[in-house]
Image (cartoon, rainbow, N blue to C red):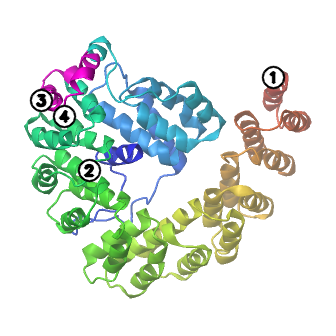
Amino acid sequence: MKTNRINLFICLFSFFTIFTVCSNIILISAQEPIQESAQNDEMLQIAVLQKVDLSKATDAELFEVVTACRRLTTIGTEKSVEVLKPLLADSRLASYARTALENIGGTAAQTVLKENPAQANNASPQNEKFQNAIASLQTILEDSKQGLNLFSELLKSNDKILFYVALTAFRKFSDRKIVDVLAQEQASLKPEHRIAAILALLDRNDVAPVPQPIIETAKSEPNEEIRAVALLVLGAFPDANVIRILFSTLQDSSNSETILSATFEALATTRYAEIDQMILELLAENNPNLQIAACQLSGERHLIAAEPFLWKIVTNSNHDHVRNAAFAALGRVVNQEGFAKLLETYRNNKNETLKPFLLLGITTACRQASDRTIYAKLVTEKLSDFAALQLELFATIGGSESLARIAETVKITEQDSIRDLATKYLGEWIGAEAAPVLLDLSVALKEEKYKVRTFRGFLRAVRQFDLPKEEKRNLCEKALATAPREEEKKLVQDILSRL
């Protein structure tokens, strides 16, 4: 439930959804870039975390930090570990930073997590006033009636600390009646407290069935942010009625992007047992808006059973927006055979407007390749006339096979533009396996520009990625004799001096 809370809370303030489901909103312009590189996106999120002074942060700035943590949960690498580490000491942000670090994994992230173990109630302010108030609640919480009355009073307090004491009591109080009290009282709170109170429902396991005041808030609350949070809570505690409300909201094109995005996220993450079958049925509908939503949901939920439905849409649909959504979703659900079919479709495609969406599906499939070697071989086989695109996809797939194919391209190509692109990808390669490949290329290449670039890439790989000490020493000793310039030789000597 805690993970759901993180995922659902952040999406209100995140606008990274690839498409909107509203018919009067342009899905994606074919002229616009379909995606940023994960690396550039990661640097943008790191910059957000670095610029915010947490001791003075406004609510808007905290939302930016939370959103950045959500993005880093998906795209973060070791580069993000150091900027996430300080957030573990902030009670408001610790759970979001911890989730990002857990998903990043690796030695550095695991070390930081071990050094900063999770603290109980780390989402609440920790100070003397707070601790004293919590201590005074312990005996009162034993009495249901007194506890509920006190909870109601604290919840309505304008004092921020006392309000958070109420939310802590909400998490500790065993009586299910406290859920109904919060649901009833939240309507009278100021907006920021109301949002926090509704989100606190996600900290309990006994909310279902969702109280009617929360359902009414999700259906008709005029404040979009509050309504969006209520919709997210509905998705966390689904039943047939809740799912009907969410789909009804999704179909209403008068709703704003904020509401539609929150509704979509609720459906994408819900654990309702029958949701996947409902998505498959919607894929067969003749309603374009519903088909677009179903395409998106099948992709978000990695619904493998949706693949034949999606291929049918791209083959038969007369609506470009629906076909585009289906191509994008295919990238998330296809197996190796489906990936080969996507590549063939791109190779034979004559419709320029479809290209960006085909590429989106192909690139997405590359990122989640089940077998990097096979996927790299398929790209080589199916896209032999698309040298630049091959290089991009090899870089996206990663792995030793892709690395070897880019290196081979550098050696055999007669096009300087392709050599330039290939050495650029190699120089930015993520992984220690690139070090010996780059060193060999720096010796084999004749042009100084590429000798220096590949040698610099070698130095970066040796510095940044884990290599056995003896292997690193051997590589550096070899590099010392082949350094293209005195400047690079000094850098190698510096590395050797530290071994």
- Magenta stretch containing residue 143, yes or no? yes
Side of 291 relative to 149 (left or right) = right
- On the image, the x and y values in percent for residue 122 come to 39, 28
Side of 105 relative to 83 (left or right) = right
Q: Determine which quarter of the picture holds residue 170.
A: top left
Q: Magenta stretch: dominant SS? A: helix
Upstream in sequence: badge 4 or badge 1: 4
Q: Residues within 10 Å of mark 4 (few under 14, many from 20)?
A: few
Q: Which residue is mark 3?
A: 149
Outermost residue to the top = 128
Upstream in sequence: badge 1 or badge 3: 3
Q: Is residue 222 above or below residue 268?
A: above
Q: Residues within 10 Å of mark 3 (few under 14, many from 20)?
A: some
Upstream in sequence: badge 3 or badge 4: 3
Q: Which residue is mark 4?
A: 192
Q: Which residue is mark 1?
A: 498
Q: Which residue is mark 2?
A: 233
Q: Is residue 321 visible?
A: no
Upstream in sequence: badge 3 or badge 2: 3
- On the image, the x and y values in percent for residue 249 come to 19, 63
Upstream in sequence: badge 4 or badge 2: 4
User: Which residue corresponds to the image point at 29% horizontal and 35% vertical from the top-left?
Assistant: 171
